[in-house]
Amino acid sequence: MTQSFCNTTQRWTLRRAQGNAAMRLICFCYAGGNAAIYLPWQAALGADVEVVAIQLPGRGTRFGETPIEEMAVAVEAICDAVLPLLDRPYVLFGHSLGALLAFEVSHALRARGAPLPNALVVSGAQGPRRRVLKRKLHLLNDAELTGELERYAGTPREVLDNGELLALVLPIVRADFRMAFAYRHTPRAPLPVPISVFAGRADNFDSPAQYEDWFDDTRAGGTLHWFDGGHFFIDSARGQVLEQLRKILDHRHAEPAQHRADCVGP
């Protein structure tokens, strides 16, 4: 591993290294999210799991960087960053936009012949094949976009009420919404990776059929798990979410990881 490769990994990830961890949980944020939201999960999941959070440009320690608007660009950069971390079994978790990123990273890693995740956990997101976004949220003016953030109920009130903070957040959110709107599913062989779908019972943005759409993209089976709360149930039902994640991690650690391109095929 070269020094530049180490620097790439450090720039794109937040983690508290767990030297004896048997497995890694690599997490992807929702639109506008900061990777730091996942760091408290480390204590809850224990030292045998290392939580790695993907930090996109424009937020947190990468505040001065220009946000990425194209998913393909983000996916390739993320793959470069995580390759050194695939030396042990791992699971990918993504919420909302992060679910699409985790899904596309799985396919990109397979195309590279890299080790595949033991499981893919997609949360708060429609399945990619029949995904339909009717509203161009990235084209809304600042006031309208702020209203959408209030409706999603995932942005802290102190940010929404602070004009200066909001002015910093909106360009990041707009770039992420543009990425989400432009996303189109590419027909490919289903992944040889089990998919677990997390959904909120009070999430008004998706239907049960759209969640089940994820299962068309795996040939290793999948499960749909419901949680109390709306779109950001990963916050309001955090205990339930982490308990289910712990079960998935324990179960998948007991099974051999899927590896390399010999898993490709219908």
Image: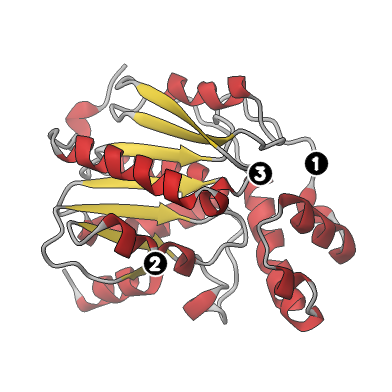
Q: Is residue 93 above or below residue 11?
A: above
| Image-based side of 250 in relation to 110, left or right | left
Under mark 2, the amino acid is Leu
Q: Give the residue number, with chain letter if any, for mark 2.
A: 39
Q: Quadrant of residue 80?
A: bottom left
- Of mark 1 and mark 3, the one earlier in the sequence is 1
The residue at which mark 3 appears reads as: 182
Residue 237 image position (x, y, % from top left): 52, 48
Among the 4 quarters of the image, the one containing residue 261 = top left
Marks 2/3 in contact by CB < 8 Å: the verdict is no
Q: Amino acid at mark 1?
A: Arg
> Can residue 81 be seen in the rendering of this structure?
no
Which of label 2 and label 3 is nearer to you?
2
235 lies left or right of 147: left
Q: Between residue 31 and residue 241, name the one nearer to us.
A: 241
Marks 2 and 1, Cα distance to the nearest angstrom? 32 Å
Q: Which residue is mark 1?
A: 135
Question: Residue drawn 61% across and 42% down?
Answer: 229
